[in-house]
Amino acid sequence: MKTVIIAEKPSQKKKIKEAYDSGNFPELGEVKFVNARGHLFELKEPEEYTDTWDRKNTDGSWKSNDQVLNALPIIPDDWNYRLKREARSKKGQSVSALFKDIQAAVKWCDQIIIATDPDSEGAAIAWKILWKIPEYQDKVIKQLEFNAQTIPDFQKAFRSLGEGKNYIPMAYQAMAREKSDWLVGMNISRLTTSVLQKQGYRDYFPVGRVQTPTVGLIVKRELEIQNFDGNENWRIILVDQPNDVKFNGKESETCFTPENGGKASAEKLLSILKQGESKVVDLKTEAKVLSAPKLYKFSKLMADASRRFKFSPGKVKKIYQKLYEDGWVSYPRTDEEKIAPSEFKYLLDNVNKFLEILEINDFHVANTIPDKRYVSEGKLDHSANIPSSQIPTVAQVNSWDMEQQKLYKMIVLHTMLMFAPKMSFDGTTVTVNNSNLLFTVKGQHIKDQGWTKWDNKTKKDKTLPDYQLGQILNLTPTMNQMNPPKRYTEIDMTDHVLDSNGLGRPSTQAMILEKVESTYLNKNSKNAELSPKPQAFVLMDFLNDTNLASPEMTAKWEEYLDKIGENKDNASQEVFVKQTEGMVNSLINDLSGKIGTFGGVKAAQDNESSKKTIKTVFGEFKYTYFEGKGKYGTYYQLKLFNISTNELEHEIGKKQMLYALNMNEDKLVKLLETGRLGKTKFETKEKKKYSVDELTLNPDFTVTKHAEWIK
């Protein structure tokens, strides 16, 4: 027997090999280890299918908006994948070399063990490679099924290998999502941008199957805030003024908006309540308990870390991924809030080690039997986000950077709380009747703080007066003005907004927010509140009443994608892609001739004074300058427009000047006017600074860096 093991990336291969070498698996025979580096294959760009779909002419100039529109739809007859162009391994090995290594190993072996992450993306990484190697069909194919990247987890997986073919539907799921996103992005981004630019809007308007309805939620909330009329939004309550106790009625009966009469209706009810009496009709006190929170799923983990440490969702994802790859935590991209009985056991057996890391010495373990709130006896695709069975020492944790320490300790503490006592309290509810409307107030007396003692969520008593059943209370009817809805924050989006609207998955939500923030949203630096840029109003007004503006439709798409991955209800990649093609064709037909002022934002052509004229070494143009925030830093961009036609012809800066330090409009203008710019400092994605001695402008308006050197 000759076996090849295909890992997702070099670091994973190293750990799997360590698990194999320290175990005993003679049944695998002679073993070779190879690795990908994430996705080795990606869909071809439109221009790789036909020049008609290229956004540039053969001379390098940009095609007119009419040319772009006439080329739509962009729908390949046969989808083609090719090797990624830009990815390289840490050792400098090219993607082509990585594929050749895997290809040779597959030809050599009798058995293939896929050891990429056992999820849809991991399955797609592996199967897209294998489908490019015809010899795979003659091999036995198994799947290494693991929930954490620890030596014991990998060894356990080696002893009970899964069937590789069971993961093919997951690969189809990822590929269906990939093709659908490609179709929407390539077609509707070009459609929207070209139609709007023809009317004078000079921005680029990217559109995404999930990103666009996310922008729509932010715009919808902003419009709710703008349209909120405080004079017509009121809530009626009853107040025991001497004791400062407030009784609240049902929202449907005591809250008034323009839709149900507004201020006039509120004043009418207020008058009725002032003439009535408030009688205690129900009074009960019950002994209650409050369990510790459910275990983390990834969206809740991101929200909690953002709330506690002010980390962005993207930052949380990056920190967690590092902890996962090092073997300290379980698989990241999960919607699950439960764990397996075996995981409960190792966590319980090692409570003291975890408490030592947390520096807690007064913890009381009260729950030693698996609780169905946290533990599932059924099969789990992936467990909740918990610390793995590979437990670091205190010294090891202290050697990590502070961000990793904070996140790991947060996860450990949250997990340990399921073993802590429940919080217990006496809950009292008092209900009064006034004019046949019921108003209630609740109080509580804490008997045992339970788990809240260690989670910095200590509860306080809320003591009520000694009300008696049948008592007539002297309550004052009060009309309070309601506040407008609040803007969403990044925490809101990952905590509940995206999930409740079926937008994205744990693996994509952080990326979705980063993408839409860079183009369509402003983020308040103090509280991370999100508000729309003018471009967002334009986009959503233009796409109004289409499926792409609908979170509900996007949620249905996600449900169908899940069915593909689960191999249920005859759901298929082909059907999903065909449905997307149909939607794309309908949008092109419906929107190509759409004319108007969108989102209340006037087109740029109404203010031509915002454009400046520049004489470059290759001709005269009008231009606009823009600074934006990308994933890793600031980028700078000049757009050059034809003097006569006003058509966009060239863009310079966004890619060539990406992450230049201290760049500005004057420097870019100098580069265009003289064809060169002196020494310029840059910064890599990894925050390494480097300099170039000179930048020169090429006839096609690309930029060449000369004498590049790293500090």
Image (cartoon, rainbow, N blue to C red):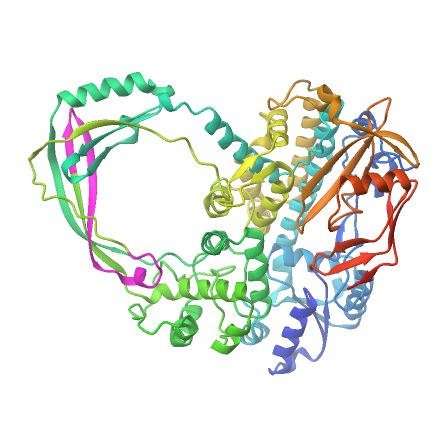
Q: Quadrant of residue 518?
A: top right
Q: Is residue 453 visible?
A: yes
User: Is residue 456 shown in magenta?
Assistant: yes
Residue drawn 63% across the image and 25% down it: 542
Of residues 113 and 298, the one nearer the viewer is 298
Of residues 550 and 638, the one nearer the viewer is 638
User: 553 above or below 79?
Assistant: above
Q: Quadrant of residue 277?
A: top left
State which region is magenta.
431-458
Decide if residue 694 is on the left or right side of residue 198. right
> Which part of the image, by quadrant, shows the C terminus?
bottom right
User: Is residue 317 shown in magenta?
Assistant: no
Image spot of residue 71 (x, y percent)? 81, 30
Q: Is residue 145 visible?
A: no
Image spot of residue 665 (x, y percent)? 76, 39
Of residues 348 and 87, the one nearer the viewer is 87
User: 278 above or below 91?
Assistant: above
Decide if residue 660 is on the left or right side of residue 696. left
Of residues 439 and 704, the one nearer the viewer is 704
Image spot of residue 480 (x, y percent)? 29, 28
> Which part of the image, by quadrant, shows the N terminus?
bottom right
